[in-house]
Amino acid sequence: MCGIVGLFLKTPELEPQIGRLTSEMLEILTDRGPDSAGFAVYGHQRPDRMKFTLRGGDFATLPALIGGGAEIEIRDDHALLTVAASEEAAVRAILREKSPATKIVGVGDRMELYKGVGRPREVSARFGLPGMSGTHAIGHTRMATESAVTTAGAHPFSTGRDQCLVHNGSLSNHNNVRRNLVREGQTFETANDSEVAAGYLSWRMAQGAPLEEALHGAMADLDGFYTFVVGTASGFGVLRDPVACKPAVMAETDSYVAFGSEFRALTKLPGIDSAHIFEPEPSRVYVWERAA
């Protein structure tokens, strides 16, 4: 089952409200996924700085371990580590060697990603989602059907810098795709089929494909039932499989594009009464990009 939401702003007026709006959308879809929830918010980039979202380990010791002006902000059982943009590889090595209990949830110039077990309202509150600002956000409420209810199994899945994906459905060929991607150097943290979909898109984009081309590739190479909502540093994409049995609805105004598994997730958005409401078509790639 599961529930997906997404909100991509075309203009800056709603940026201070994106966390609150996303939190409300997630809460409305609690009955589609009461087991766990998660979200990614794309905030504004700081010059020459990048963000690691982390979970596990002793966060308080990390700035001293990493040095170089590293900053830590603890949010419940996750933390946001901000470091010099040139230090990504070095920080990964330090975490691997000196803080192995610390897991990297997401990395990016703009993206922060938080997820956990619990009802969407509780997860949003624990991480302070209602107070966050940004240009776009995606979220997920999970009803676990094929794997355990754990934080690691919650969405979104991030397998590339400033890239993440939420998924409603089930992939039938994820084991074969995973093996092929591992041979290409892609790494995975879970056995979840949704992480394979995220890894596939990261692999495509690492080869130079823009988001739209990567989603066309996914349509050719991933089998099963799926609705994907994908975030990148500047983009927001939606893809449904050819059968499109998973529910989806979108709303577009001059200010935003919004996605929900059900229309009721969109009902609290400003201007929804005059929005263009439509169901995304099967096998059609939808992408919106912000100007650099």
Image (cartoon, grey):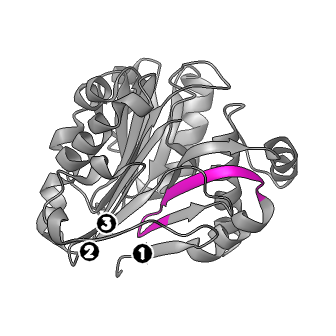
Within 10 Å of the Cα at label 1, are there few (<14), some (14-19), or many (20+) other Cα atoms?
A: some
Give the residue drawn at x 43%, y 46%: 4
Q: Which residue is mark 3?
A: 251
First in residue order: circle 3 vs circle 1: 3
Range of residues picked out in magenta: 222-237
User: Looking at numbered disc 2 in the image, what kind of residue is underneath it?
Assistant: Lys
Residue 255 part of the magenta-drawn span = no
Q: What is the quadrant of the C terminus in the image? A: bottom left
Give the Cα separation between the discs numbered 3 and 1. 13 Å
Of the two numbered discs 3 and 2 in the rendering, the one whose residue sits closer to the viewer: 3
Q: Whole-Å distance between the Cαs marked 1 and 2?
A: 9 Å
SS class, disc 1: strand
Question: Mark 3, residues whose alpha carbon is within 10 Å: few (<14), some, or many (≥20)?
Answer: many
- Give the image quarter of residue 250: bottom left
Residue ID for mark 2 = 10
| Residue nearer the viewer, 245 or 138 | 245
Judge whether residue 255 can be spotted in this image.
yes
Q: Which residue is the site of mark 1? A: 288
Three-letter amino acid code of the residue under disc 1: Trp
Horizontal and vertical percent position of residue 266? 27, 53
